[in-house]
Image (tube, rainbow, N blue to C red):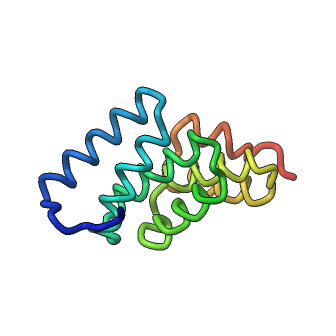
Amino acid sequence: MGESRGRTPETDVIDFRAAEQLLAARDPKGAVKLLDEVIAAHPENTAARLLRARAFFAAAQLRPAELEFSIVLEREPDNAFAHFALARTYERANRPDQARRHFRLAAALDPQPEYLAAAKFDSDS
């Protein structure tokens, strides 16, 4: 099943775009399925990994989401969105200390209102 023979760069782009549409249409498991193929063919594709992490999160598959967001952050430690999303994952997994750390990293990297609010810098705990 995870065979990448017969795939072309175009196939991968089409599957990536289709996965974005499936995630937007609230079918995260369908998105994961498509992205598994893309990532099997291109394990280095960070955008596909980030999208798959979002799909895992949307499907409430917190452990795979955490793993995928962590891989993205190993490659792009300054990716504020990935820090924020990993923090949300930790929050849902009831791991507040890890969540707080990544919320704060997200806000430090990109001080947009949503990230700053989640970081709760004013309430130091």
Q: Up-down: is 38 above or below 13? A: below
What's the residue at 34%, 56% (across, down)?
A: 47
Q: Which residue, as the protein is rendered here, is positioned at the far front? A: 1
Instruction: Compare residues 42 and 116 and report the one nearer the observer.
Output: 42
Q: Up-down: is 45 above or below 103? A: below
Q: Up-down: is 49 above or below 56? A: below
Q: Which residue, as the protein is rendered here, is positioned at the far top? A: 25
Image location of residue 105, percent across then percent down: 60, 58
What's the residue at 26%, 41% (across, down)?
A: 17
- In the displayed structure image, the side of residue 34 where residue 57 appears, left or right: right
Instruction: Compare residues 74 and 61 and report the one nearer the observer.
Output: 61
What's the residue at 30%, 59% (across, down)?
A: 38
What's the residue at 64%, 43% (across, down)?
A: 60
- In the displayed structure image, the side of residue 115 where residue 41 appears, left or right: left
Image location of residue 107, percent across then percent down: 58, 49
Q: Up-down: is 64 above or below 89? A: below
Image location of residue 49, percent across then percent down: 41, 59
Image location of residue 22, percent across then percent down: 38, 34
Q: How many marks?
A: 0
- In the displayed structure image, the side of residue 113 where residue 42 appears, left or right: left
